[in-house]
Image: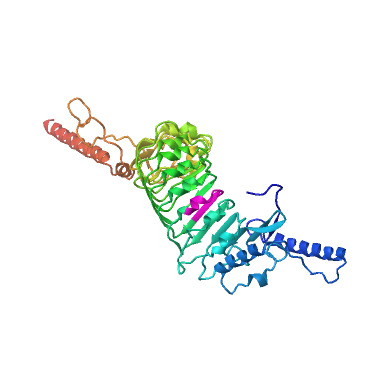
Amino acid sequence: MRPAGGCCRRGGGLLVLGLALSLSAALLLRCCAGQQAEDDGSADAPAAATAPMEEKERRALYAAIESFVGKGWNGSGLYPDPCGWSPIQGVSCDLFNGLWYPTVIGIGPVLDNSLQCAPDAKFSPQLFDLRRLRTLSFYSCFPASNPTAIPTAGWEKLSGTLETLEFRTNPGLTGGIPPSLGRLASLQSLVLVENNLTGPVPAELGALSRLRRLVLSGNGLSGPIPATLGGLTGLLKMDLSNNLLQGSIPPELAGLKSLTLLDLRNNSLTGGLPQFVQGMASLQDLLLSNNPQLGGALPQSGWETLAANLATLDLSNVGLVGAIPANMAKLTGLRFLALDHNRLTGAVPAELAQLPSIGALYLNGNNLTGPLEFLAGFYQRMGQRFASWDNPGLCYNIAAVDVAHAPSGVVVCKDLQEPSVAPDGDGEVEGGRKPEASSSLVASSSSGGSSARVGGLWYLVVVQGMVAAVLGLLSRLL
C-alpha cells in the first residue's frame, strides 16, 4: 500500500518512464544539486547530490540484480545513485516518507541497454528484502541451458506490496508454480507465459482476492483446473491455454462475473461446454478451441445474455455434436465465430447471416446438410472469412448466388430426378425418404455424368429402337 500523502517516482522506468525521461530526470537533478550548492555558498559541494535512500535497501538492490546479470556487474560503481542521477534501466523508484525505494524491477532484452540475465542467472534472497517492490518481471532470462525453479520461500515478505509478477519466455524456468505465490495478498497480475513450468495449477492461487489477470499459458501444466479459482471474483482475464490441463471446466467458475476473457484453448478438457458461461454477461472473448474431447452440444437457447459484449467465440475442434441453434443469432456483438472441425449436423441457420457485426464465420469440417440460405451480399462481404467446405451434404442455390461469389468448396444444389432405389408400391422411395444430395452426386451431375442422365439416355435409345422396328413392320405390310 502507498503511504498517506502520496509518492513520487524517479528512475530508469522500463515500465514507467523510459530511458528519455530517465536522462531528463538525471539532468534535472544535476541542475538542482548545482543550484543548491550555489545557494549554500559551498564552492566545493558535490557535483550531484545522492537521493536519500536506506543503505540496506541499496545493497539489497545491487545484490538482487547481480545475481541475475552476473558477478562482473559493479552496481555501486556504475550506479551509485540508482534512484537519482544514475538510474538503472529497468528499475524505478518511489518516494515514501522522504526516502526512495525501488518499486519496479524489469530484467530482459527489451531495450538495447536493458538489464539482461547472465547464462548462470539465479535468484538471490536479497530480492525479497526490497520492501516496497510492486512490479517484478523477467523476460527471456532463463535459457534451457540454465534450469531454474521459481523460489518457494520469501514471497510472504512481499505480500503487502507486490502487485505484478511476470515471467515471459523463459525455457529454463522449470518445476512447478509455488503454492506460496498464493500469499501475495496484493497481487493484481500474475503472468507466467511460455516457460517450462510443469505440474498442477496450485489451488492456493484462489486466495489472491485482488487478482485481475491470471495468465499461465504456454507451459506444461497438467491436472484439473482448480475449483478455487472460482473465488477470484474480481478477475478480468483468465488464460490457461496451451497446457496439458484435463478434466471438466469447474462449475465454480460461474462466480467470475467480471470476466472478459476466458481462454482455455489447446488443452485436453472434457465434460462439454458448461452452460454457466452463458451467464457471464461481461465476457468478450470465449476461446475453447482444440480440446478435442470436450464434446457436448451447443445450448439451444440463452445466448442473448452474452449479446452485449461477446465478440469472439472460438469452439473449433472441441467435439461438438448436434445442430447449430438459430438462437445464436442473438449474439449481436459477435465478430468472430468458429465452429469448424466438429461433428455438427443439420442445417445452417439462415439467421447467422444477420449477425450485424460478424466479420468471420467458420463452419468447415462438419456434417452439416441442406442448402445454405445466405444471400449473395453476405458472401461478397465475407470473402474467405466465411468457410463451409468439407460438409458433404451442404450446397448453395445458384439461383440466389452467382458462381463468382459462391462459397468455396460448396457445390450447387440440384434436385435428384432419378432415385437410386426403386419406388415401393405406394410411390414412396424405399426406406421412407429420398436419398440425400451428396457432393459426389452433384459433382457428377455438373460434369454431365450423373446416373439420372445415363438413365434418360438409355430410355431414349430404347424408344428410338422400338419406333424403328414398328416402321419397318408397317413398310412390309403395306
Side (left or right) of 74 relative to 282: right
260 or 11: nearer the eye? 11
Determine if residue 196 is in view: yes
333 or 358: nearer the eye? 333
The residue that appears at 59% across and 52% down in the rendered structure is: 161
Name the residue at the bottom extreme: 72
Q: Is residue 79 above or below residue 158?
A: below
Span highlighted in magenta in the image: 180-192
What percent of the width, then of the height, locates residue 88? 65, 65
**Number of numbered discs overlaid on the protein picture:** 0
Magenta stretch contains residue 18: no
141 or 305: nearer the eye? 141
Magenta stretch contains residue 187: yes
Q: Is residue 477 above or below residue 172?
A: above
Side (left or right) of 258 relative to 57: left
Position of the C terminus by quadrant: top left
Residue 425: quadrant of the picture: top left
What percent of the width, then of the height, locates residue 448? 31, 44
The residue that appears at 72% across and 55% down in the rendered structure is: 98
The residue that appears at 42% across and 32% down in the rendered structure is: 326
Model colouring: rainbow
What percent of the width, then of the height, locates residue 123? 52, 64
